Image: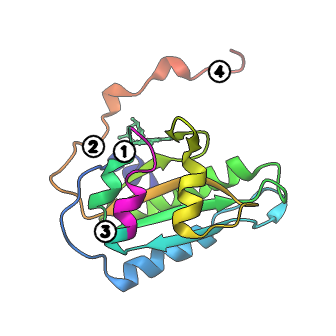
Amino acid sequence: MNVQKLLFKRKSIRKYIDKAIEPEKIDALKKAALLSPTGKRKNHWDFIFIENKTTLNKLADSKIHGSKLLSNAALAVAVIGDNKVSDTWIEDCSIASIIIQLQAEELGLGSCWVQIHKRQHSEHLMSEDYVRNILNIPDSKNVLSIIAIGYPEGERPANKEDDLLWDKIHEERF
Ligand SMILES: Cc1cc2nc3c(=O)[nH]c(=O)nc-3n(C[C@H](O)[C@H](O)[C@H](O)COP(=O)(O)O)c2cc1C
């Protein structure tokens, strides 16, 4: 699929059917993650691929709103960075997150970004600390997002040319 078609087709998918993702597709997702660029080529990121249902259910409780969808995903990818190694860790991990999502779309899978960084699990616990504990991530590392992936349940209509926010595009000056 060409990139423009892929971009129109991609929508956040939060409901998945109960079907495992083939190992070749998981392999392609791993390659996509490792192909994502980083500032100064620091490559400080790490990616945890999770298929274990018990772990997915625990991750679904990472925050009060917006993480429950992880419980019916076939796969979750935790995107981890290191703010001691790179001052562009958020940008780098964001790029990796969307590249994983686009690769998933191209493979016929649906995906959704679950924000972890700066989110609260509960009054006294940050989502990052909750996730660190479940996935055994060192305290020195940062967790930006978890990308939920699976075969979509139903179809979401693609983005439409008519809905593009053309007034956000400026020529030469704001
Ligand atoms: C930085 C970022 C954080 C997001 N966090 C969440 C989240 O925690 N939970 C969720 O269900 N969707 C999350 N989303 C998905 C957005 O809600 C979604 O991309 C947006 O509504 C546009 O819809 P679309 O992706 O279908 O085009 C996030 C997206 C981005 C880019």
In this view, the mark in front (1 or 4) = 1
Choose the circle earlier in sequence order: 1 or 2. 1
Q: Quick check: which quadrant has ligand 1?
A: top left
Which one is in front, 33 or 81?
81
Camera sees residue 1: no
The residues bearing labels 1 and 2 have C-alpha atoms spaced at a distance of 6 Å
The residues bearing labels 4 and 2 have C-alpha atoms spaced at a distance of 27 Å
Choose the circle earlier in sequence order: 4 or 2. 2
The residues bearing labels 4 and 3 have C-alpha atoms spaced at a distance of 43 Å
Residue wearing tag 2: 158
* Magenta stretch in the rendered image: 55-64
Q: Determine which of the numbered discs, if any, sits on residue 171 in the image.
A: 4
Q: Quadrant of residue 63?
A: top left
Disc 3 residue crowd, few under 14, some 14–19, many 20+, Cα 10 Å: many
The residues bearing labels 1 and 4 have C-alpha atoms spaced at a distance of 23 Å
Residue beneath the point at 30% across and 50% down: 13
Residue wearing tag 1: 8
Residue wearing tag 3: 74
Check whether the beta carbons of the residues at disc 1 and disc 4 lie within 8 A of each other.
no
Choose the circle earlier in sequence order: 1 or 4. 1
The residues bearing labels 2 and 3 have C-alpha atoms spaced at a distance of 22 Å
In this view, the mark in front (1 or 3) = 3
Q: Is residue 21 left or right of residue 78?
A: left
Badge 3 marks a residue whose secondary structure is loop
Amino acid type of disc 4?
A: Glu
Residue extending farthest front: 124
Badge 1 marks a residue whose secondary structure is helix
Camera sees residue 91: yes
